[in-house]
Amino acid sequence: MKGSPIKGAKDVDPKWERTHPELVVRDYLRPGIPPNDSFFIPIENQSSADRTDYPTQKPTALLRKLIKASSNKGDIVLDCFVGSGTTAAVAETLGRRWIACDLSRFAIHTTRKRLLSIPGVRPFVVQNLGKYERQLWAGAEFGKENGKKAAERQHAYIEFILKLANSTSIHGYTWLHGIKAGRMVHVGAVDAPVSVGDVTQIAAEFKRKDAPTTQRRRCARLGFRFRIERGREAAGGSG
């Protein structure tokens, strides 16, 4: 403060503090080290026993902090993109239940191997949502048991996926099913991968004169699986 006789902490004595209380603020710390609003956690380097060489692996110490801060023993921890399995492994060691998902088979293999290396790991199940499981789910969910025709079940399935993707459905097309944020949306079949042939058909519908005008004329393709060879070249660069 300009003009103040106080230049440093040594200039404040108990008497002056009593006569000028408006200029003195004391901050009493509780026993221990005050927490910071940020923390530094190193990566799992080559000497780390937890290192898996999975490209997106997160440090064990980071997940330990997050899981301990946001759950209690016996709670369920969900990781929809489990990658190297750090979340599942840490949740297991902390006494949490867990559900781990990933589209990559390598991620599931890495996570399974990592869990099995934990001493005293509890039994767990690896589920594969394959073609027949998806068919069974679709039949139960969209009315096969109620006698609905195949076309009605397919329409219900597409509407369901579009709703999950927060997309608006459109009609009058075979391969274009919806629109979202300026892009068309194609919903792949429940029991077959999205192939190059599908992409070619999508591109053909884009070329129709009555096709909706969208930003950059791009299409988001939603599917359970994709053929390895499918790509931009099949659609002439239509995304």
Image (cartoon, rainbow, N blue to C red):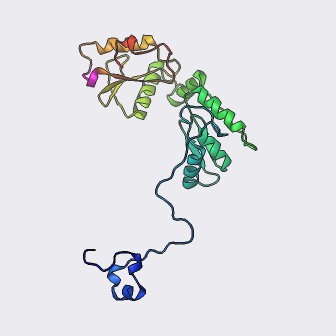
Assess whether residue 213 is covered by the magenta stretch.
Answer: yes
**Residue 17 at what x, y percent from top left?**
38, 85
Count of numbered marks: 0
Q: Main secondary structure of the magenta part?
A: loop
Tell me if residue 12 comes above or below residue 75 in the rendering.
below
Residue at image position (64%, 40%) is 48
Q: Can residue 127 be seen in this view?
A: no
Image x and y of residue 193, in percent: 50, 18
Residue 74 visible in image = yes
Residue 58 is covered by the magenta coloring: no
Q: Establish if 198 lies above or below 23.
A: above
Locate residue 38 relative to residue 107 in the image: left or right: left
User: Closest to the observer: 138 or 90?
Assistant: 90
Quadrant assignment for the C terminus: top left
**Residue at screen point 35% across, 26% down:** 178
Q: Position of residue 54 (x, y in %)?
A: 58, 31
Image quadrant in which you'd find residue 43: top right
Q: Specify start and end residues of the magenta stretch as a single range.
A: 212-216
Judge from the rendering whether residue 6 lies leftward or rightward of residue 229; answer left or right. Answer: left
Apparent side of residue 97 relative to residue 1 in the rendered image (left or right): right
Q: Nearer the viewer, residue 188 or 30?
A: 30
In the image, residue 120 above or below residue 164: below
